[in-house]
Image (spheres, rainbow, N blue to C red):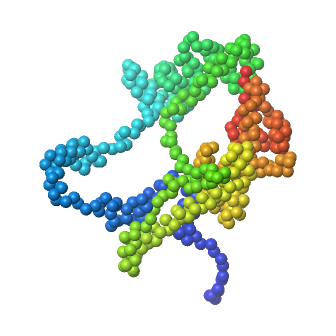
């Protein structure tokens, strides 16, 4: 086969390292951005915080003040000098008795309380009970089998079948250990089902608690009827009136279906707003949150040395370019966030003035066309970026929603429709809640035409139960 040379022209999209970094920083949340900035500060010596004094310069003017005259120093010597020495000794003593060792010996994390896990809490109670070693081991085994909600997910027969035969542990021994475990705090721990967990909590209450026995009968045998709000059958099977059933239902509502929900909680995730909105001269205006913007700059001393020594260290030159890119891309990130936020606030003036019912329909393309950006860029900007206003803290994506036509020929956003649905449900009669069809009719009277399936979808999105589960006595 004869070899030939061919010339081919084609187009290819190439993302430069700077553009890749810009896209990565844009889609980060503020907390992730702070973590990334800390990593760059540790890796790149040419990068420093803007609020720090540059290397080679005095940190403040106080460091350059002239010394006091010799005469004044002589006059102030004597007792004052002794007091200074004593103060120095006291300072050393207060910091651990050794100069410079105070920071190493004092760990601030030691003052942070460590949360107690469910296992540690139960084992501490087990240690206060006088039991033979074998019985303590059985209860400890059952503690290890509990799930995060405090339930025993496996049956006692299954647990016994997985134990070594040489231990000779029978199901009856496991049952005795389980009964002991169910006496520990919090009430309901060690239950094998929801009815058992609620019953264990009711048994801990005062026997004189009104309708305690009725509540026990309901959770043991009629919990499904209570969950379906079938009050007619409940009253018939239990032979009680409305007042007694209402009191028992209120008592059951005080119980915790997840007995150990307070243990092993995940760490709190804090949200830092990127933009704040305030009213100025009758208009709502968006401004950047200065506390969320990292203040970075290139170390001028190193940059000057590299400029004077051209063609020198290639590694340091690349680090210099990397630092410049990072500073520029972070500035570009917050400029883009501010532009998008300003456009959103300008279009949603009615929301900041009147609330959710006045939210206007808005899609990503509207903001993209107005600012000359791509929709994907607007999507990155509005994801995990937050806006703080007098009405609360909102993600920027919250202000986008589809539009539905009204009878007057206008448009209503999905957020406004959800607000209308919630207001109607909040005002409904507890004994006669509104069905989805009734909500459709109520909205149509306000000029909003919505299908019943749309009402159901919005109601489920707001985690509002259906009509049969909202009914009360």
Does residue 322 lie above or below 195 as drawn?
below
Q: Residue at x 22, y 58 (%)?
A: 68
* Side of 465 where 260 appears, left or right: left
Q: Is residue 441 visible?
A: yes
> In terms of depth relative to the viewer, which is nearer, 266 or 93?
93
Please state the horizontal and vertical placement of residue 2, each as a whole percent of the image: 64, 88
Q: Residue at x 60, y 61 (%)?
A: 336
Please state the horizontal and vertical placement of residue 289, each as a whole percent of the image: 54, 53
Does residue 22 lie above or below 404 as drawn?
below
- In the rendered picture of this protein, how many numbered marks are placed on residues? 0
Of the 4 image quadrants, the one containing the N terminus is bottom right
Please state the horizontal and vertical placement of residue 45, each as a whole percent of the image: 38, 65
Of the 4 image quadrants, the one containing the C terminus is top right
> In terms of depth relative to the viewer, which is nearer, 280 or 122?
280
Q: In the picture, residue 392 is in which quadrant?
A: top right
Q: Residue at x 57, y 11 (%)?
A: 208
Does residue 236 lie above or below 373 as drawn?
above
Please state the horizontal and vertical placement of residue 300, each as a whole percent of the image: 40, 69
Q: In the picture, residue 70 is in which quadrant?
A: bottom left
* Side of 166 where 84 appears, left or right: left
Q: Is residue 237 visible?
A: no
Q: Residue at x 33, y 44 (%)?
A: 107
> In terms of depth relative to the viewer, which is nearer, 94 or 81?
81
Does residue 39 lie above or below 309 as drawn?
above
């Amino acid at each position: 086969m004869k070899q030939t040379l061919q010339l081919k022209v084609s187009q290819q999209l190439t993302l430069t390292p700077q553009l890749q970094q810009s896209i990565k920083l844009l889609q980060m949340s503020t907390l992730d951005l702070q973590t990334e900035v800390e990593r760059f500060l540790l890796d790149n010596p040419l990068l420093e915080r803007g609020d720090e004094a540059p290397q080679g310069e005095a940190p403040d003017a106080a460091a350059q003040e002239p010394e006091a005259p010799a005469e004044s120093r002589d006059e102030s010597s004597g007792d004052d000098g002794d007091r200074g020495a004593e103060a120095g000794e006291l300072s050393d003593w207060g910091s651990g008795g050794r100069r410079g060792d105070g920071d190493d010996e004092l760990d601030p994390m030691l003052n942070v309380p460590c949360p107690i896990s469910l296992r540690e809490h139960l084992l501490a109670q087990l240690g206060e009970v006088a039991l033979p070693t074998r019985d303590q081991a059985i209860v400890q085994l059952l503690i290890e089998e509990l799930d995060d909600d405090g339930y025993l997910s496996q049956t006692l027969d299954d647990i016994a079948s997985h134990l070594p035969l040489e231990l000779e542990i029978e199901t009856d021994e496991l049952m005795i250990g389980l009964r002991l475990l169910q006496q520990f705090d919090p009430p309901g721990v060690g239950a094998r089902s929801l009815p058992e967990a609620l019953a264990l909590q009711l048994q801990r209450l005062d026997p004189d608690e009104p309708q305690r026995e009725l509540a026990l009968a309901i959770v043991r045998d009629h919990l499904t009827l209570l969950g379906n709000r079938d009050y007619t059958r409940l009253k018939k099977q239990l032979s009680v009136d409305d007042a007694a059933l209402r009191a028992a239902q209120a008592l059951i509502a005080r119980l915790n279906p997840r007995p150990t929900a307070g243990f092993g909680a995940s760490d709190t995730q804090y949200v830092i707003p990127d933009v704040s909105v305030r009213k100025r001269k009758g208009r709502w205006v968006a401004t950047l949150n200065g506390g969320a913007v990292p203040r970075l700059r290139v170390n001028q001393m190193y940059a000057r040395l590299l400029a004077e020594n051209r063609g020198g260290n290639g590694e340091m030159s690349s680090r210099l370019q990397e630092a410049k890119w990072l500073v520029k891309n972070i500035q570009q990130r917050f400029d883009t966030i501010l532009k998008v936020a300003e456009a959103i606030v300008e279009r949603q003036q009615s929301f900041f003035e009147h609330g959710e019912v006045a939210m206007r329909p808005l899609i990503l393309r509207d903001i993209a066309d107005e600012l000359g950006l791509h929709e994907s860029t607007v999507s990155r900007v509005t994801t995990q970026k937050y806006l703080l206003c007098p009405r609360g803290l909102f993600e920027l994506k919250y202000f986008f929603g589809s539009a539905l036509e009204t009878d007057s020929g206008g448009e209503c956003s999905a957020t406004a429709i959800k607000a209308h649905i919630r207001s109607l449900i909040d005002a409904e009669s507890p004994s006669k809640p509104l069905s989805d069809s009734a909500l459709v009719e109520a909205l149509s009277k306000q000029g909003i035409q919505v299908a019943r399936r749309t009402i159901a979808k919005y109601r489920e999105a707001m985690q509002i139960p259906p009509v049969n589960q909202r009914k009360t006595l």
